[in-house]
Image (spheres, rainbow, N blue to C red):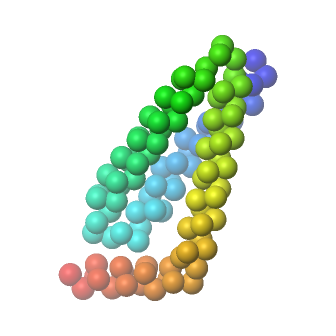
Amino acid sequence: MLFAIGLAPVLAIHNVLNPNLNSAAMRPLGAMAGTGAAVLGTISMGFGALIGAVLDHAYDGGVTPLCIGFFAAGAITFVAVRAAHASVGSGQRAVVETTRSSTTAS
């Protein structure tokens, strides 16, 4: 019961945050935002199915596999975001400006 009480606000915040973050991710794509949304949805669904299959196989009647899955997904996301920030660096502004100028020119 305590797990459900702690999980409820996390899932509620996730449901509010996820659509906003997806919209922010589509902003630099401009006219190709539909394609970007399709790719993002496909990747999300694929990884979700893989993680779900692993958690289903590890299920033992308790919440331990789910907790481990949440921790692993959070750790992977943290590493991916850090790597993305390190690779983009100051060049992100140039990419956004180029995308904006190409969408306004057409």
Q: Residue furthest top?
A: 61
Q: Residue furthest right?
A: 2
**Residue 67 position in % (x across, y down):** 69, 32
Task: Identify which residue is drawn at 37% across, 84% down.
Answer: 98
* Rendered view: 23 above or below 103: above
Of residues 39 and 10, the one drawn nearer to the viewer in this rendering? 39
* Rendered view: 14 above or below 98: above
Task: Identify which residue is drawn at 41% across, 67% down.
Answer: 27
**Residue 56 position in % (x across, y down):** 54, 23
Q: In screen coordinates, is 96 left or right of 4?
A: left
Which quarter shows the C terminus? bottom left
Mark count: 0
Of residues 61 and 97, the one drawn nearer to the viewer in this rendering? 61
Q: Quadrant of residue 90?
A: bottom right
Which quarter shows the N terminus? top right
**Residue 93 position in % (x across, y down):** 50, 83
* Rendered view: 13 above or below 59: below
Task: Identify which residue is drawn at 58% across, 59% down.
Answer: 80
Task: Identify which residue is drawn at 29% across, 83% down.
Answer: 102
Q: In screen coordinates, is 80 left or right of 8?
A: left
**Residue 74 position in % (x across, y down):** 65, 47
Q: Residue furthest left?
A: 106
* Rendered view: 73 above or below 67: below
Q: Quadrant of residue 69?
A: top right
